[in-house]
Image: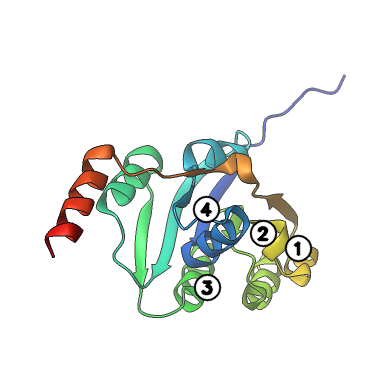
Amino acid sequence: MVENILINQSVAILCDGNNIERSIHDLSGSKNTMINFDTLIPKLLNDRGLNRLLYFREGKAISSKFAERLHENYYGSVVPCHKSADIPLSIKATQLASKVDTIIIMSGDADFVDLVLHLKGEGVRVEIAAVRQTTARILIDEADYFHEITKEDWFVYKAPRKTMLKRRANKSSQ
C-alpha cells in the first residue's frame, strides 16, 4: 500500500518589484495597478512553507504601509536598491540557496537566466512567477516551473476620496 506523504518544502520568494510593476502596468494600462499578494502568495506556495519574502525595488520611495503589510502578513521585507534589483536579488538568492528547497523569482527579466542555472546547479528548485507576455522565453525554459501572473493577481489602487479632494485643493491653490 502506498501512503500519501506530505513533503515539507521551504520556499523563498524574491520579487524584482520594478520588473513586475512595469509588466502589470503595461498590461493593465494603469500606473495604479498593484500585485495582490494576499491571493498571489498562497497560489505560489501551494501549501509549501514560506521561509521569507523579499521585495527588491529601486527608485521612488516605498510605501511604509506596503512594507508593513508584507512584514505583518508574510514576515516579508522591502529591500531598497540603488539601481537595478538584479545584483542584490542575485546575491540574496545565492545566500539562501543552502537554506531553502525552492526559490521563486518574481521577474521576467532574462538577466536572471545565469542565476537560475547557478541555483539549479546548487540543487535548488527554481520557479519563475511573472506576466507571460513580458517574460523572456529562455527564463521560462530554464526554470523548473513557471507561474503565470494574470489579472486575477492584481488590482487597481484607488486613492481614498479625501486624498483626491486634498490633491485637487492643493493644485488649485498653487
Marks 3 and 2, the one that precedes in the sequence? 3
Tell me the tag on residue 64.
Answer: none
Marks 2 and 1, the one that precedes in the sequence? 2
- Is 168 situated left or right of 173 in this image? right
The residue positioned 70% from the left and 72% from the top of the image is 117
Query: Residue 43 versus residue 45: which sits nearer the camera?
Result: 43
Where in the figure is residue 29, as x and y percent of width and height?
Answer: 56, 56
Marks 4 and 3, the one that precedes in the sequence? 4
Q: Secondary structure at mark 3?
A: helix
Q: Residues within 10 Å of mark 1 (few under 14, many from 20)?
A: many
**Disc 4 + disc 1, Cβ < 8 Å:** no
* Distance Cα–Cα, label 4 vs label 1: 18 Å
Q: Secondary structure at mark 4?
A: strand
The residue positioned 56% from the left and 41% from the top of the image is 40
- Is 108 situated left or right of 71 in this image? right
Query: Three-letter amino acid code at disc 1?
Result: Ile
Which image quarter is the N terminus in? Answer: top right
Where in the figure is residue 150, as x and y percent of width and height?
Answer: 65, 46
Q: Residues within 10 Å of mark 4 (few under 14, many from 20)?
A: many
Find residue 73 and report its image quarter. top left
* Distance Cα–Cα, label 2 vs label 4: 10 Å
Residue that label 4 marks: 12
Query: Three-letter amino acid code at disc 2?
Result: Val
Marks 4 and 1, the one that precedes in the sequence? 4
Q: Residues within 10 Å of mark 2 (few under 14, many from 20)?
A: many
Q: Secondary structure at mark 1?
A: helix
Residue that label 1 marks: 140
Q: For the image shown, how many numbered marks are present on the structure?
A: 4
Marks 2 and 4, the one that precedes in the sequence? 4
Tell me the tag on residue 126.
Answer: 2
Where in the figure is residue 154, as x and y percent of width and height?
Answer: 54, 44
Residue that label 3 marks: 90
